[in-house]
Image (cartoon, rainbow, N blue to C red):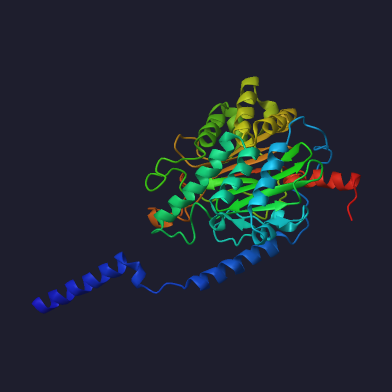
């Protein structure tokens, strides 16, 4: 019996060692994982770019004439100068990696998932002066709120690495890349892109017009409760005000807005490589809202638009308000405080999705990893009807000024 007891204790000890020291178990080599990531990236690009760009639209097709070339009266000179300063800070080799043609497919090659193999120059390879110049570009293009959202999302990616046994090969604050499309110019079209896990900014410039979509923001977790950036949080206003919008509806309106009370998975429809999604309006039209409800909806939209610099955000909000009666609000999920949900705001000139997602990087910390939770949020802002990446403005520019 004593001998059997000793054997039992030995087996328990071995089991405990295997559980608490996973590094003793065989691990896939880094080179193998890198190869898998590249293969998955190439497959995503092949499938996502198989069709020429058309833009997100309803089944009736792209509506034309929504985005005329015009002067906004809001200068883009600070952004142009910041972009030139950033490019000048790079080495020749880095600059070659960072620059693409204005109509290059690179615009459409972005992904919010961590495995994606990206182009451009990465923050990890930048020195301090180059990083300062990169943030200078963001500071010129974004509002203070938009810059904070971007930086905090990057910091929370560091938190995710900490929560995964300090896995900074897959996650980290500096795993983000910048590309510049075209040459920064006062008159010719150009733009830049920031691409990385849970942070994507596409910023197109033509004269003093700006299009800042597709724009992706998110994180897992959205609130850091430990680690280097403890206390950092994002997208709490978007969450709170989205729920408040639903709560502001009467019973009849809510019945129209809610597509389903069941929220069992991810509901975002317009993330990476979804440039040509056919998406009809759903939910309730703001034409059925009271004046107070319309004001609340406009303020909710402004939470997203105001990540742009203040001047161009005002220009975009003027455009949004012109189409407010044609704007739809749709909801998936419960109606009790503290629950998980998805909401979509959809008009001819803007499309916004907010989604509580299933756990991915934090699956190992969840009691039930098969249900969405509030610590993984994805937000996407799009310009439907053909003007994501400023494509409709670029088309009009080429029609007026043919390029060989």
Horizontal side of 364 relative to 186 (left or right) equals: left
Where residue 123 appears, as percent x and y from the top left, is 56, 54
Q: Nearest the camera: 175 or 110? A: 175
Horizontal side of 289 relative to 165 (left or right) equals: right
Q: Give the answer, above or below, for where 351 lies relative to 273.
A: above
Could you say which quadrant of the image residue 41 lies in? bottom right
Q: Give the answer, above or below, for where 282 lies relative to 244.
A: below
Horizontal side of 286 relative to 34 (left or right) equals: right
Horizontal side of 319 relative to 23 (left or right) equals: right
Q: Nearest the camera: 260 or 343? A: 343
Could you say which quadrant of the image residue 397 lies in? top right
Residue 60 in view in this figure: no
Residue, x 79% and y 39% (percent of image)?
A: 207
Residue 165 in view in this figure: yes
Residue, x 58% and y 31% (percent of image)?
A: 254
Q: Give the answer, above or below, for where 55 lies relative to 171.
A: above
Q: Nearest the camera: 282 or 159? A: 159
Where residue 98 appears, as percent x and y from the top left, is 67, 56
Query: How many callouts does the rendering have?
Result: 0
Residue, x 70% and y 42% (percent of image)?
A: 81
Please identify the quadrant where the C terminus is shown: bottom right
Q: Give the answer, above or below, for where 196 lies relative to 387.
A: below
Where residue 265 appears, as percent x and y from the top left, is 53, 51
Of all residues, the one furthest to the bottom in this rendering is 3
Could you say which quadrant of the image residue 317 lies in? top right
Where residue 348 appears, as percent x and y from the top left, is 74, 38
Residue, x 76% and y 59% (percent of image)?
A: 51
Of all residues, the one furthest to the left in this rendering is 2
Please identify the quadrant where the N terminus is shown: bottom left
Of all residues, the one furthest to the top in this rendering is 291
């Amino acid at each position: 019996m004593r001998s059997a007891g000793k054997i039992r204790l030995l087996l328990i000890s071995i089991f405990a060692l295997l559980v608490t020291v996973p590094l003793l178990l065989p691990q896939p080599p880094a080179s193998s994982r890198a190869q898998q990531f590249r293969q998955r990236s190439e497959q995503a690009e092949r499938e996502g770019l198989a069709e020429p760009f058309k833009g997100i639209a309803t089944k009736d097709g792209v509506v034309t004439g929504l985005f005329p070339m015009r002067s906004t009266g809001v200068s883009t000179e600070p952004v142009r100068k910041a972009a030139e300063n950033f490019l000048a800070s790079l080495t020749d080799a880095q600059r070659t990696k960072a620059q693409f043609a204005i109509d290059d497919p690179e615009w459409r090659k972005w992904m919010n998932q961590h495995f994606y193999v990206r182009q451009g120059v990465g923050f990890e390879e930048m020195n301090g002066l180059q990083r300062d110049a990169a943030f200078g570009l963001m500071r010129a293009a974004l509002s203070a709120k938009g810059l904070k959202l971007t930086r905090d999302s990057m910091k929370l990616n560091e938190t995710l690495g900490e929560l995964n046994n300090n896995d900074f090969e897959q996650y980290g604050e500096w795993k983000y890349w910048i590309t510049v499309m075209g040459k920064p110019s006062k008159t010719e079209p150009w733009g830049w892109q920031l691409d990385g896990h849970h942070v994507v900014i596409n910023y197109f410039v033509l004269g003093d017009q700006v299009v800042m979509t597709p724009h992706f923001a998110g994180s897992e977790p959205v609130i850091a409760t430990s680690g280097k950036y403890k206390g950092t949080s994002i997208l709490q206003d978007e969450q709170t005000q989205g729920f408040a919008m639903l709560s502001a509806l009467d019973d009849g309106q809510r019945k129209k807005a809610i597509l389903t009370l069941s929220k069992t998975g991810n509901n975002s429809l317009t993330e990476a490589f979804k440039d040509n999604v056919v998406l009809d309006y759903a939910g309730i039209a703001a034409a059925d809202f009271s004046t107070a409800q319309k004001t609340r909806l406009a303020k909710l939209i402004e939470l997203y638009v105001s990540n742009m610099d203040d001047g161009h955000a005002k220009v975009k909000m003027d455009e949004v308000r012109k189409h407010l009666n044609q704007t739809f609000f749709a909801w998936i999920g419960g109606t009790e405080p503290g629950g998980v949900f998805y909401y979509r705001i959809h008009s001819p000139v803007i499309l916004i999705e907010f989604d509580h997602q299933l756990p991915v990087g934090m699956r190992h910390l969840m009691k039930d990893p098969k249900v969405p939770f509030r610590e993984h949020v994805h937000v996407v802002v799009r310009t439907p009807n053909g003007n994501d990446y400023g494509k409709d403005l670029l088309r009009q520019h080429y029609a007026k000024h043919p390029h060989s």
